Image (cartoon, coloured by chain):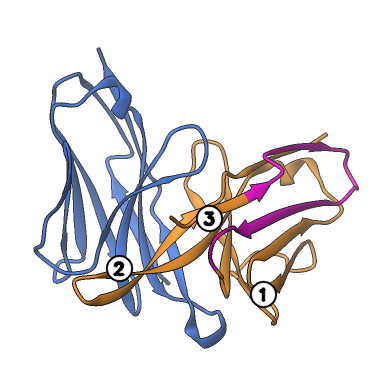
Amino acid sequence: GAVVSQHPSRVICKSGTSVKIECRSLDFQATTMFWYRQFPKKSLMLMATSNEGSKATYEQGVEKDKFLINHASLTLSTLTVTSAHPEDSSFYICSASYPSWDRGRLNTEAFFGQGTRLTVV
Amino acid sequence: EDKVVQSPLSLVVHEGDTVTLNCSYEVTNFRSLLWYKQEKKAPTFLFMLTSSGIEKKSGRLSSILDKKELFSILNITATQTGDSAIYLCAVEARGLGSQGAQKLVFGQGTRLTINP
């Protein structure tokens, strides 16, 4: 089955430093990956769409200079939180879509990484 | 603006009860609706629904989509304490990515608690 691996699962960093989170599709190629952020007791909020070989597309209200996304290959996307601030502390999850057939129709199912809990102190 | 709304936001029932979780949506270029279960970490996939009126079942869980009324329900029968989790509804829609790549828009989630 399709597996998406996210690393690290947990990171603690000091204010002002940068943190890189990796998202890898292990057994399939993902031209598009998605980055989400989840606040405590809240749902997932889409931050940006990561496109292989081109610039990421950010959702409204997400600072692209703060959350740098690089999709250098068909199996790897990275999210770098720059100049981290305590309010950036959150749970970050990536997902990649994998096509499947259902009743003769091509569907795409999103598989999630394990998530990264970022704490900025 | 694409929107997915779940109800109730929180539900507490006794073991053995049957629950129905609701999800309504307004999105452009709808492709599919998905249900996820989230316990401690990343969500785990439950169902993908693309056609109206066709029930999908997996054990005690079932789900159905109504594309005319723009909603879906997730039923859980004979609930168990292990069903306690946040249930997320997401709609796959055409996003802003290259070639109009799809994106998932999530609802707020329903926090389900099953008491013994």
Q: Mark 1 or mark 3: name the one nearer the start of the chain.
A: 3
Mark-to-mark CA distance, 1 and 3: 16 Å
Chain shaded blue: B
Residue interval drawn in magenta? A6-28
Foreground: B74 or A71? A71
Q: Position of residue A24 (x, y in %)?
A: 64, 58
Q: Position of residue B9 (x, y in %)?
A: 33, 39
Q: Are marks 2 and 3 on the same chain?
A: no
The subunit carrying tag 3 is A
As shown in the figure, which amino acid type bears the numbered disc 1? Ala
Mark drawn on residue A45: 3
Foreground: B62 or B29? B62
Mark drawn on residue B32: 2
Mark drawn on residue B33: none
Quarter of the image with the C terminus of chain A is top right
As shown in the figure, which amino acid type bears the numbered disc 2? Ser
The subunit carrying tag 2 is B
Query: In the rendered structure, does residue B75 fall within the stretch colored magenta?
Result: no
Q: Position of residue B102 (x, y in %)?
A: 45, 74
Q: Residues within 10 Å of mark 2 (few under 14, many from 20)?
A: many
* Residue at x 22% of width, y 48% of height: B22
Name the element at disc 1: loop
Which residue is denoted by mark 1 in the rendering?
A56
Q: Colour of chain A?
A: orange
Q: Position of residue A33 (x, y in %)?
A: 57, 67
* Residue at x 16% of width, y 36% of height: B60
Which quadrant of the view contains residue A75?
A: bottom right
Q: Are marks 2 and 1 on the same chain?
A: no
